[in-house]
Image (cartoon, rainbow, N blue to C red):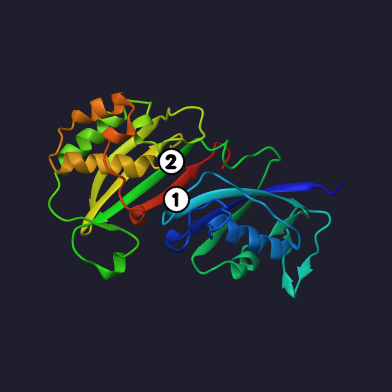
C-alpha cells in the first residue's frame, strides 16, 4: 500500500455562484469544484474534508480543507504540467499553480501545507472568525459583497448588545432548527461593530459556530440599532433559547469567513 501524505489546502472564494461549501446532490458547491479539480490533477477520485460549512452566497477569505495523497504512486508529470515537485527532503509536494489553473476564477488555493497524518481540518480548528459587511449608500461595486441598509443605526447600543453576547455560551436562539449537532454551546471571544468606509463591519470570533448563527446575531443587533429593543433585551432572547425570539437572518452576501486557527499552523 502506498504511503499517504495529508495536506491542508488554504482556500479563498467568492460564494456568490455557489450553494455553499459542502457537496450537495442537486446544486453546485465550492467543495464539489475543488474535488473535481483535484480528481483531474491527481487522476484518481478525491474527497476533501473542510473546516466547516458556509451557506449559499457566503464568502470565505480563509477556509482550510484536508486530503490524503498517495505520494509513492503519483507521477511527476500529467498532461505536460508539473503536478508535484520535490522539497529539500525529496518529498512530493502538490503545486498550487497546477491546481488553481483547474479551478474556476472565483475559487483560489492560497497554500498547500503538508501536515501530520491525524490532522483534521474540522475537528482540530480552535477558533473561527467571521465578518459581516453592510453599507448605507447605493454602491454597484458592493453588490453581492455587502448588505445595503437604510436609515441610521445606534452603533454604540449595538456594541453594548454584542458585549452581552460574549457573556453566554448557549446560543440555541441563533441556530437553525433540526441541525445535527450535539450541543449549541459556543465560546465567543470577540463580538464588535466597527465603522469602515460607507458602512459597518461586525467582527465575531468563537471556537465554533452554529448554522445561521452569525446572520441571526447580526439581525438581532439590528433590532437594537433601530431602537426596537434595548441592548439588555438581548439577554432574554438568548435565555429563551427560542429562535423565533431573535432577529431575522440578514442576507448572506455580506458574510465572510475570515480566519480559521489551528494550534500547529
State the image coordinates of residue 206 (x, y, percent, origin top left).
41, 35
Which label number is shown at residue 211? 2
Position of 112 relative to 167 (above/below)? below
State the image coordinates of residue 195 (x, y, percent, origin top left).
22, 50
Question: Can the viewer see residue 230?
Answer: yes
Real-space Cα separation, disc 2 to disc 1, in angstroms: 8 Å
User: Judging from the image, what secondary structure is the residue with disc 2 in?
Assistant: loop
Tell which residue pokes out farthest to the right in this image. 1
User: Judging from the image, what secondary structure is the residue with disc 1 in?
Assistant: loop
Which of disc 1 and disc 2 is earlier in sequence? 1
Q: Name the residue at 19% across, 41% down.
A: 223
Q: Which residue is mark 1?
A: 55
Mark 1 Cα-neighbour bin, 10 Å: few <14, some 14–19, many ≥20: some
Position of 240 relative to 81 (above/below)? above
Question: Can the viewer see residue 87?
Answer: no
State the image coordinates of residue 260 (x, y, percent, origin top left).
49, 44
Left or right: 31 in relation to 140: right
Q: Closer to the camera, 233 or 11?
A: 233
Amino acid at each position: 500500500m502506498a504511503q499517504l501524505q495529508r495536506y491542508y489546502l488554504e482556500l479563498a472564494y467568492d460564494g456568490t455562484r455557489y450553494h455553499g461549501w459542502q457537496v450537495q446532490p442537486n446544486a453546485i458547491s465550492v467543495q464539489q469544484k475543488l474535488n473535481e479539480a483535484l480528481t483531474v490533477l491527481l487522476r484518481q477520485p478525491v474527497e476533501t474534508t473542510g473546516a466547516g460549512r458556509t451557506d449559499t452566497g457566503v464568502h470565505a477569505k480563509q477556509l482550510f480543507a484536508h486530503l490524503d495523497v498517495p505520494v509513492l504512486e503519483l507521477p511527476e508529470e500529467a498532461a505536460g504540467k508539473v503536478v508535484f515537485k520535490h522539497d529539500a527532503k525529496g518529498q512530493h509536494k502538490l503545486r498550487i499553480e497546477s491546481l488553481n489553473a483547474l479551478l474556476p476564477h472565483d475559487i483560489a488555493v492560497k497554500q498547500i501545507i503538508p501536515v501530520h497524518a491525524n490532522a483534521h481540518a474540522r475537528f482540530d480548528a480552535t477558533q473561527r472568525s467571521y465578518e459581516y459587511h453592510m453599507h448605507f449608500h447605493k454602491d454597484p461595486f458592493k453588490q453581492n459583497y455587502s448588505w445595503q441598509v437604510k436609515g441610521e443605526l445606534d452603533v454604540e447600543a449595538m456594541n453594548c448588545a454584542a458585549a452581552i453576547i460574549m457573556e453566554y455560551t448557549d446560543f440555541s436562539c441563533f441556530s437553525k432548527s433540526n441541525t445535527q449537532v450535539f450541543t449549541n454551546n459556543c465560546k465567543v471571544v470577540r463580538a464588535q461593530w466597527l465603522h469602515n468606509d460607507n458602512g459597518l463591519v461586525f467582527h465575531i470570533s468563537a471556537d465554533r459556530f452554529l448554522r445561521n448563527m452569525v446572520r441571526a446575531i447580526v439581525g438581532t443587533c439590528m433590532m437594537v440599532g433601530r431602537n426596537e429593543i434595548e441592548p439588555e433585551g438581548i439577554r432574554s432572547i438568548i435565555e429563551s433559547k427560542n429562535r423565533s425570539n431573535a432577529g431575522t437572518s440578514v442576507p448572506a452576501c455580506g458574510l465572510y469567513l475570515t480566519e480559521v486557527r489551528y494550534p500547529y499552523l
